[in-house]
Image (cartoon, coloured by chain):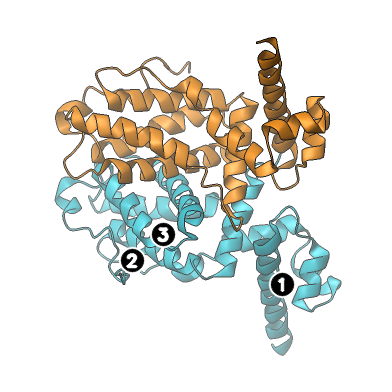
Chain colours: A cyan, B orange
Amino acid sequence: MVKQERALRTRRAVLEAAAHVIGSRGYQAATMAEITQRAGVTKGAVYFHFTSKTALARAVVTEQIAPFLPQASDSRLQDAIDFTHQVALALRSDPLLQAGTRIAVETTFSEDPLMPYQAWTDIITTMFTEARANGELLSAVVPERAAEFFVAAYMGVQLFSRAASDRADLPHRVTALWKHTLPGLASPGVLSHLDPQGRRVKLAV
Amino acid sequence: MVKQERALRTRRAVLEAAAHVIGSRGYQAATMAEITQRAGVTKGAVYFHFTSKTALARAVVTEQIAPFLPQASDSRLQDAIDFTHQVALALRSDPLLQAGTRIAVETTFSEDPLMPYQAWTDIITTMFTEARANGELLSAVVPERAAEFFVAAYMGVQLFSRAASDRADLPHRVTALWKHTLPGLASPGVLSHLDPQGRRVKLAV
């Protein structure tokens, strides 16, 4: 049990070191050697958890989402809105999420992209599919296609905000994203009850 | 006159060499030396046109849009749709446009981002502002905010398509982008007359 705990702590240290190195140098330039050194663990310990830089990158990209998943409420569209606002707030300070974005974008241009958008698309597809079952969606909307569109747009909004304001205006841009897309997603009766700013995340401005 | 022509040809050769080198190595790893060598010109000739890698990058990012600007028709919203489809088609094969995207994305994470989205935002803002004057927009839409949202979303859709299909599905994803956003942009009477696939660019599928 203690052994397992230590293994988890090592794994976490490697992920955090990877986030730091990738965040400062970019994914292509980051090396396993530097990540190992920064994590303060042995090379064997790193490779026990991650067999390659790609495996490590995949973990950084996919494992950081779980803490932000909301419990299902009576509106899955509102849950999706809230979820994206929670992530937006965290993105401003969480090195792991920030590194995940950078990996996603850099591997987009490689021969074998990690397809980093998949985990996000799966989550949003599930939410939209449940929203459909609740009668929240317009009849023309196909949940999986809408989710792919939304995840792509969200990625673009994140990058725009990073370039424009180092992410300071990200919550506002996520609100604008929902304001512009909800009329094409939500059935009219539902639309007026949704809060594009998110329920639990009121902007402190 | 002949001298000026030669200068323009040199400038073009440098831009194309830059696109090739950046396309294969990425922006951070590309060097002025390699670009100069590939262009087959002297170092002095390169620096006559571009005083730094940043200046060269700025030219690659901003100057490739002009050929795709449509003439104004009676629907500026449809013009915007057509414009984005023309760019999408060209993105699948034009090294300069592809390098522009890569520079945009990589400099997003630098201390001093090029703010590469600005030229696109200006173009779309103009189109949306004229669409407003034509009565094509919903009253709640603010042209400049809508343009910023749209440009960000378009960037994300491009990246998603690059990762998912090496841009093969980009025209379809641009159509989906418009289908999802037009209900939040266009006034109802206009909406039914717009073709989200673009007028001059029918998909050959």
Indicate whether A48 appears above or below A177. below
Determine the CA span between mark 3 and mark 1: 28 Å
Location of mark 2 (residue): A72
Q: Is residue A121 visible?
A: no
Looking at this view, is B50 or B161 the one in front?
Answer: B50
Mark 2: give few (<14), some (14-19) or many (20+) Cα within 10 Å: few
Q: Residue at x 18, y 38 (%)?
A: B138
Q: Position of residue A133 (x, y in %)?
A: 28, 51
Residue type at mark 3? Answer: Leu
Q: CA distance from mark 2 to mark 3?
A: 24 Å
**Chain containing the residue with disc 1:** A
Q: Amino acid at mark 2?
A: Ala
Q: Earlier in the sequence, mark 2 or mark 3?
A: 2
Q: Residues within 10 Å of mark 3 (few under 14, many from 20)?
A: many
Of label 2 and label 1, which has the lower sequence position? 1
Say which chain tag 2 marks: A
Residue matched to label 1: A14
Residue pointed to by mark 3: A170
Q: Please state which amino acid type lies under the numbered disc 1.
A: Val
Quick check: A195 left or right of A125?
left
Mark 1: few, some, or many residues within 10 Å (few <14, many ≥20)?
many
Can you give x and y, in whole percent of width and height, for residue B134 in the image?
19, 27
Q: Which mark is residue B182?
A: none
- Callout 1: helix, strand or loop? helix
In the rendered view of the protein, which quadrant contains the C terminus of chain A? Answer: bottom left
